[in-house]
Image (cartoon, coloured by chain):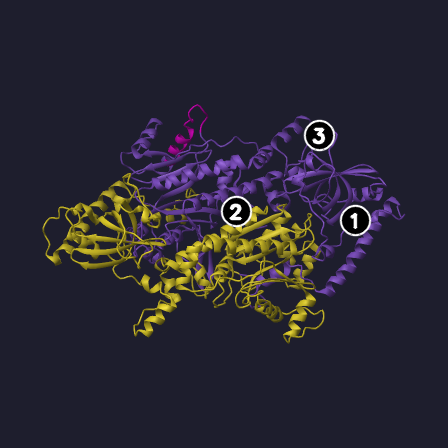
Chain colours: A yellow, B purple
Amino acid sequence: MSSEAPPASSAEELAADLSAAAISKKQLKKDARKAEKAEKAAQRQQQQPQGNVEEDPHAANYGDVPVEEIQSKAISGRTWTDVGDLGEASAGRRVLVRGAAQAIRPVSKKMAFVVLRQSMSTVQCVLVASADAGVSMQMVRFATSLSKESIVDVEGVVSLPKEPLKATTQQVEIQARKLYCINRAIPTLPINLEDAARSEAEFERAEQAGEKLVRVGQDTRLNFRAIDLRTPSNQAIFRIQCQVENKFREFLLSKKFVGIHSPKLISGSSEGGAAVFKLQYNGQPACLAQSPQLYKQMAICGGFERVFEVGPVFRAENSNTHRHLCEFVGLDAEMEIREHYFEVCDIIDGLFVAIFKHLNENCKKELETINRQYPFEPLKYLKKTLKLTYEEGIQMLKEAGTEIEPMGDLNTEAEKKLGRLVKDKPLPGSSPLNFAGLALHSPAFLQCHLGPAGEEIISGAQRIHTPELLTKRATECGIDASTIASYIESFSYGAPPHGGFGVGLERVVMLFCALNNIRKGSLFPRDPQRLVP
Amino acid sequence: MSSEAPPASSAEELAADLSAAAISKKQLKKDARKAEKAEKAAQRQQQQPQGNVEEDPHAANYGDVPVEEIQSKAISGRTWTDVGDLGEASAGRRVLVRGAAQAIRPVSKKMAFVVLRQSMSTVQCVLVASADAGVSMQMVRFATSLSKESIVDVEGVVSLPKEPLKATTQQVEIQARKLYCINRAIPTLPINLEDAARSEAEFERAEQAGEKLVRVGQDTRLNFRAIDLRTPSNQAIFRIQCQVENKFREFLLSKKFVGIHSPKLISGSSEGGAAVFKLQYNGQPACLAQSPQLYKQMAICGGFERVFEVGPVFRAENSNTHRHLCEFVGLDAEMEIREHYFEVCDIIDGLFVAIFKHLNENCKKELETINRQYPFEPLKYLKKTLKLTYEEGIQMLKEAGTEIEPMGDLNTEAEKKLGRLVKDKPLPGSSPLNFAGLALHSPAFLQCHLGPAGEEIISGAQRIHTPELLTKRATECGIDASTIASYIESFSYGAPPHGGFGVGLERVVMLFCALNNIRKGSLFPRDPQRLVP
């Protein structure tokens, strides 16, 4: 669906207008004239302090590009190279790259370095004034006048440095011949990318050396997320997140699951409880779905034997912890069960082993990058869900000093304790687990897959599939069955036994990379205090 | 994130409690006793009318399975076969299948047919009373007593029918030996699956024959969506939808895009306008994102060169049309532009050609299935976006009788007319297009890819990437720039030129399958009148 909706005043149109570079020709011309003037003024200002008023015969090789020049005006046909693709094989080639000027180091009037960054890669560009190369001292000065993080185009020749480079991810340099600024960053950024990218070890080394480095707090990072996201570890974290989702989808598709999208706007009192965001929907009370639970079950009733969904989940909980968000991405699955919930466990086992294996094998660069800033041990996990009978679970608890009344239900505390006991079980010939599947079976069904602190990561269960039992259970839970009538009715049209599970995408990333805060795994996190940006 | 959040009264826990078949042992036993009694009573009732009180030696081969038997009690180790996997090669094999009893046809006291359906496949099960086979007349009677759509397990031997079968998708039958009902549907369903699955042609044939068939209206379908979704065409539509999304992701991932998730809960006045759902977020005014526009641009500012997102989009528009929804799934992409928006067009071209090709090649069965109920012509589309200069566009309009003031902006009406003109251009040696990309360039940027009625399907543009121009544009659009300060500020930290596009997943499905209503492409659609189910 696009912006063609009729009302001219719709927010959609405003947003489109706002974001589109659709400028009338008159306006373009006016802007162009203004920009030209501004640029000339800026150049004058730049040149005046140095008293350099002489004409530069190489002036065409550098400068600020007016905004309208890069507004779909023309196609030059030039070939662009990705910084990440530069390697020793590129040596001697003339290339054109675009990136952010991450570091600018003047060496002398005749020489400067500019480190260009393009997503996870950086390359050092060398400027040496030389009439043969078409590089003037003015061009060197122009380069050193750039503000950090400005967007810059560099054309130059790839060369192999005499000494290996430390500050860049590429083992080659670019001998710059042309350098244009596409968009200037403000001179003083609210946070410094170098500060935001430091590891704890760096801080310790600096402290030992008597240096004081700037720390960027979690909240400040989030306030200026557009800068914070540029750190190598953030670039890596969200590529990992993308891969977790990809593998989740790929694995389930290979097991005949169908990807669905259930509505997030649901009838007012569908789930009840305090943790629900409420709103008005065309005069009706509505709320935001706290999980796709009811709808993925209805899809099963609708004849889709196996379904999964990746989508936002909303929780109005006032939990200010390191592991709660008010909006997160749910990875949910639901499937028909022939006989036993263990069929779901088999899917979970295969799925998570596939995801972890995929990350370890295909995201090495990303994992190393995260490790440099936030060191972590590789995840240790059981390849199969540990299946305990109720009696075995009781026995484990008893041995650890917790007595459970025979045949009594396990309370949350006992469940958690059991989780920790499983987690602390060392792998054969190895250290304790970071992650283990646990299905405790009969009389109550429990499944939790555990994170580093014995925390539950996944929750799943066989569901009730008869309307009678559902109505009874709703009443027991204090839910007025009439408010979820269409859900309960779905089970009266012939519903197969089924079960499923749900897990938060951010939590999987947090677990795998041992991040200390769930917010690090969310692009623009939402917690009780944060709604911006 | 899972149900382990502390507050015991949280809706999440209630939902989990409600859906999980976690029943205390006592309750299980009590339920079991009750179910046993109920079953016996049902059996007595069944048997009484026929006066059959004699013991059936084959009574173990059929019956209702008590609900607790299929509540993860035991694993039988039996092998289950998918109905869709049955073929001539299966002949002679003994198989076990589960499905919905789509049709039940008594032939005599000794014979009956039960058509079992499993997602998109159906198979006919034959019951013939025979002491050798262990099939009693009581078993035949039990089968014919089942309500339609009940969930049934059938064990039997695969055989090749003497005549080809019409009513099933499989060319084999199952000679039933055992038949158990897992969950009974209510005797009279609110809508009949056969009625919901009829094509217009069937209605016409019936009318000509003087028969009157029941029509199931769109609204009734949606009221009982859990049944309606079982029609072959709906099973096919949502598999197509899933494949559109898969190919969208796969193509963009292959082009170095990173999949992201942006927040749906955003600051109160972010986009303004009337079409926004408003709510309270921990005491702050908030709204639901009408598009991921601002956030995907901030991700570009955050150093992710190319991003895409698949996620819900919310529009509080009171548009009761065949092509508007209040919640739909947005397929969005945003990318750095080196020089020209045509770089985005190239991605769009490649993407949609890849999606359409994938559907035509890999979803033949689904497309044929939809075609049987809703006949449609294969989509005809241009492989490349038609790129018109402003002057060419003006000329086309002029030739069609619409004069545009030289250098004046095209109004929406003129844009639409141009869209229709492009759409009506016949392909070389072929009929008019159903779908064509159109990029009208300079002075205003327009891109629309067109559907069957010249409607815009995709909207995209190069975006503004300087804070000055953004602020100016916001003011022109009547948006208080201070309300989107964090968005605008993102462009002052060094932002590359970029552009992107957005399209509704449901609209792509609607376009490709020529569906007459967008609701047919949404699992549980939301329109101004509909919030349930």
Q: Which mark is residue B527?
A: 2
Chain to which the residue tagged by mark 1 belongs: B
Q: Position of residue A365 (x, y in %)?
A: 41, 55
The answer as to whether the residues below labels 2 and 1 share one chain is yes
Q: Which residue is mark 3?
A: B164
| Magenta span | B415-432
Rounded to the nearest whole Å, what is the CA distance between mark 3 and mark 2? 44 Å
Q: Position of residue A76 (x, y in %)?
A: 27, 39
Residue A279 circle label: none
- Cα distance between the residues tagged 3 and 1: 30 Å
Amino acid type of the residue that numbered disc 3 sits on in the rendered structure: Pro
Residue type at the position of mark 1 = Gly
Q: How many other residues sit within 10 Å of disc 3, few (<14), some (14-19) or many (≥20)?
A: few
Residue at coordinates 84% horizontally, 39% vertically from top-left?
Answer: B130
Q: Is residue B464 magenta?
A: no
Give the percent coordinates (x, y) of residue B501.
Answer: 40, 44
Secondary structure found at label 3: loop
Q: Which chain is indicated by disc 3?
A: B
Left or right: B66, with B451 as reference point: right
| Residue pictured at 47% horizontal, 67% vertical | A322
Up the image or down, A508 lies above or below B184; here it is below
Q: Which one is closest to the eye, mark 3 or mark 2?
A: 3
Q: Which residue is mark 1?
A: B63
Tell whether A85 sits left or right of A245.
left
Chain for numbered disc 2: B
| A166 vs B178, nearest the viewer | A166
The answer to whether residue B134 is seen in the rendering is yes
Magenta stretch containing residue B417, yes or no? yes
**Label 3 vs 1, first from the N-terminus:** 1
Mark 2 / mark 1, whichever is N-terminal:
1
